[in-house]
Amino acid sequence: MKTRKKSIIGLVILTAVLFFSSCENEPPTDLTLTPFIPLPVSIEATGGEFEITVKTVVYATEGLEVTAQILASQIAEKTGIMPEVEISATAPRKGIYISGSGENGEGYELKIGKKLVTITGSPAGCFFGVQTLLQAINTEDEEGEKDFEIATGIIKDKPYYEYRGAMLDVARHFFNVEEVKQFIDFLAMYKMNVLHLHLSDDQGWRIEIKSWPNLTTYGGSLEVGGGPGGFYTQEQFKELVQYAADRQITIIPEIDMPGHTNAALASYAELNCNGKATELYTGTRVGFSTLCTDKDVTYQFIDDVVREISVLIPGKYFHMGGDESHSTPLEDYIPFVEKVQKIIKSHGKEVIGWDEIANSAIVEGTVVQFWADEANTTMGIAKGAKVIMSPAKKAYLDMKYNADTELGLRWAGLIEVDTGYDWDPETLSDSISRENILGIEAALWSETVTNIDEVEYMVFPRLPGYAEIGWTAPDKRNWDEYKTRLATYGKVFEAMGIDYYKSPLVPWEE
Ligand code: TNX
C-alpha cells in the first residue's frame, strides 16, 4: 500500500516536472527576443501572444490591397493558413490591420496586441512593417498544430539610409523574368528598396530598344561561355518594374558606356570608329571595347536608348556605367560623360555612374557609385555628388567566401560573412562621411554565376547583412550579436529551398 502511494506521488511529481519543462520549451512571448533582420529602431515587449488562426483576416485601407495580398500569401507560405483580405477604412476589433497614415517616408509602427495587429505608415512604411511582422511569426510549433503565435509589443522603426540596394548583372549571364522576380523577393524580405539591373555589357544587350532592334536580336543572343543569352521585351521589363514597385523596390536600369559595349558594337557597325562591326564576345575580359565618342550617331543612339527606357521606369535614376573604359582616351572620356549626363537629364532622369565618372564635370543631381577608387569618389564629392557605397572589398557578392568557394572571383579579396557585415559606410574612408552618402548597394556580377541556384549561394547569407547596414544605425550593429540572429535564418532559408553558404562563423541553429 505504502509503495503504491509513493509511486502515485512519484507519478504526479514526474508529470508536473514534464509539464513545466515542456512550458519552458514553449515559444517565447518576449518580442525583444525575436531575431529581426534588419534590427528595428525600438522594440517594446508586452508579454502576450497574438495567434494566427484559420479565422484571421487581413484588413487594409484603400490603396494598400496589394500589400495586404502579399502579406496574406506570405502567411500562407509560412503557415499553410491563407487569410482573407478585406478593405476597411476603420480599425477592426480583431485581426491584422494595415493602415495607411497618409505620410511620406519609410518609417512605420507595428503594434501587436492580443487580438489586433496594426501596421501604420506610408505605403512603403506599411510594406516594411509587413516584413517585420512576417519575421515575428513563430512557425516552430509542434507537428500538426493549427495556430501560430506572435509575441505582443510595439515596434517603431525607420531606415538609416534612404538607398538600400542590390545589383544583378543580367548581361554576363542572362536571368529570365521569373529569376529576377525571385531576386526581388529576396530584397523585399529585408526591406531593401533598389534593384539595379546591369542591362548591357560586352557579352550581351538585355533590353529591347525598338529603334535599334539588332541590339537584342543579335547583341543579346549569347552570354559568357557561349550559351544562349536572352533579353527582356519592353513589356516584360514593365512587368518587372511593376512587380518591384508592388514591393516598394525601384528598378534602376544601367546601360554601361562608353566601355563594356561590345554587344552594341557587334550589332551596329556605325557605332565603331572604323565603321566595322565587332564579333560577339563570350569571354570575361574587361576594358577592350568603346563607343566611338566623336561620332554624332553615337549620341543619337544613346538618346534613343535613354528615351525608350526612361518611359518604362517611374524611378528618378538612370545608370550610365562609365567604369573600366580602358580603351577610351581620357580626353575623349571626359566630354563623353558630360554629354551623356545632359542626355539623361533631358529625359527627366538623374544620373548614376561608377566612380570613374567623377573625372568629368558633374551635373547637379548626379550620383557617384564608389566601387574601387577613393580618389575618384572624393573628386566626385568635391564636385557636389552624393555617393552610393559599393566597395568591392566589402560589398561584392561575386567575391568568393573563402579559398574553397567554387563560384565567384577573388580580385577584390575573399568576403566571408563577417567581412561583408562588419564595416561602416561612413567610417570606411576618411574622405567619405555620412552627409555624402545616399546609401549602400551590394553588387552581384555574373561572370561565374549562371542560374538562380548559384545566385542564391552567393547571396545567402551575405545579403541580409547588407540590408542591415542600410537600415540599422551603426551604433546598434555588432557582428557578435548579429551572427546569433542570422543563425536562426538557416531554417528559414532551408524552408524556402534556398541553397546557402553555411559559414562556419555563424552558430547555425539545428
Ligand atoms: C569590375 S565593378 C567590374 C565589372 C566586373 C566585376 C567583377 C565594376 C564597375 N566593373 O565589370 O564584372 O569587376 O567583380
Image (spheres, grey):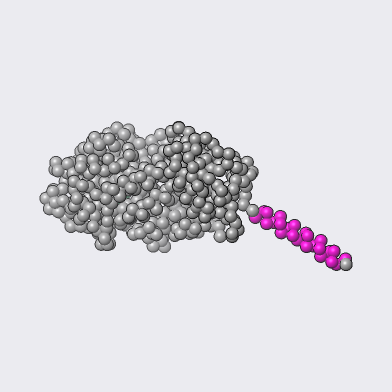
**Marker count (numbered):** 0
Q: Does the magenta stretch include residue 9?
A: yes
Rendered residue at 22%/44% (across/down): 305
Name the residue at the left extreme: 275
- Relative to 62, is 283 on the left or the right? left
**Front-most of residues 52 and 86:** 86
Give how far across and how far down residue 215 sits, in percent.
Answer: 21, 51
Taken as a whole, is the magenta stretch helix, strand or loop? helix
**Front-most of residues 26 and 396:** 26
In the displayed structure, would residue 206 be above or below residue 127? below
Would residue 240 be seen by someone viewing this image from the given angle? yes
Rendered residue at 49%/35% (across/down): 89
Give how far across and how far down residue 361 sits, in percent.
Answer: 25, 35
Please state the extent of the stretch shown in magenta in the rendering.
2-25
Give how far across and how far down residue 439 sits, in percent.
Answer: 40, 40
Rendered residue at 42%/36% (across/down): 434
**Front-most of residues 498 and 134:** 134
Q: Does the magenta stretch include residue 394?
A: no
Q: Quadrant of the N terminus?
A: bottom right
- Relative to 463, is 206 on the left or the right? left
